[in-house]
Amino acid sequence: MTQIGISVHNLGKVFGKRGGEVKNKGVGKNGDGQTIIFKDWSCVFNTGELSIIYGRSGSGKTTLLSLLGLLDTPDSGDIKIGNINPYKMSARKRALFRRQTFSYIFQRTGLIDGMSIKQNLTLPLRYRALPNNYKSVANLNKAMEQAAIDLPLSRKAANLSGGERMRVAIARALVVPFEILLCDEPTAALDEETSHIICKTLLNLARNGKTVIIASHDPLMHEYADCLINLEEG
């Protein structure tokens, strides 16, 4: 029986102040000069599947990931994680729930240049009460291997190439335990061979019971998808 990871019902999200300048691109504008990103949008993301969100620039891919990952708040509609509505929680409990449930791969990587690879990998662990084995070199090396990167843990992030930075960011997301993985253009800075390795890693995570949701322009990733969601179709 298919288990629902995230369900979205009648999602609404609007950017731009009434009567003011709209600074965000999106799918359309209303009569008040606001940018409508989502209006009455519904979808289901299943556990055990790799879902890919695609569409032109400005169609709302990154915004949707932020909403699904509880990093942003919808203006209307419901987002449920399994059977849980996180927006019925207090802000503090919702933040705790987010840390325990999600892991993220950001397009801009979010690495701190002055830190080593090891320090960047273990940074998310500072905010989680986890056993010490998560900080072990063996766990870090396992995540590095899954992300197809073989570099000294002591190397500074400032000395990494764009592709290396992305792979370290992917490894960082895999260091922590999670149920749902959200990825924003994870193969954008990677060569084709490495992209295939990353796609296989993400698909394997889904097959092992995780919910994996990816925003991507990369047609290579579509080969691995269980579900393709085109935002341009509404």
Image (cartoon, rainbow, N blue to C red):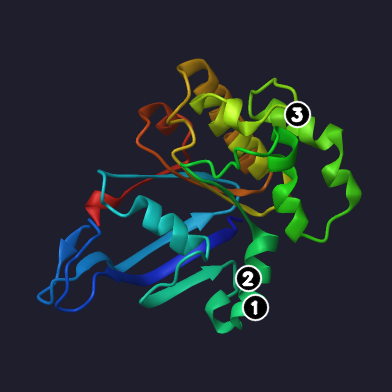
Q: Which residue is mark 1?
A: 92
Please name the residue shown 44% across and 75% down the image: 78
Q: Give left or right: position of 1 versus 54.
A: right
- Dot 2 falls on a residue whose secondary structure is helix
**Please, what is the three-letter code of the amino acid marked with disc 3?**
Leu
**Please, what is the three-letter code of the amino acid marked with disc 1?**
Arg
Distance in Å between CA atoms under marks 2 and 3? 29 Å
**Please, what is the three-letter code of the amino acid marked with disc 2?**
Ala
Please tell me which residue lies in front, 119 or 44.
119
Query: Within 10 angstroms of label 3, few (less than 14), some, or many (20 or more) residues?
Result: some
Query: Image quarter for residue 169?
Result: top right
Compared with 128, 210 (above or below) is above
Please name the residue shown 66% across and 77% down the image: 93
Q: Which residue is mark 2?
A: 95
Query: Within 10 angstroms of label 2, few (less than 14), some, or many (20 or more) residues?
Result: some
Q: Position of residue 63 (x, y in %)?
A: 38, 58
Distance in Å between CA atoms under marks 2 and 1? 5 Å
In the rendering, which numbered label is found on residue 153? 3
Q: Give left or right: position of 16 versus 224.
A: left
- Of tags 1 and 3, the one toward the viewer is 3
Q: Position of residue 227 (x, y in %)?
A: 43, 44
Pointer 1 or 3: first along the chain: 1
Residue lying at the far left of the rendered structure: 31
Compared with 185, 193 (above or below) is above
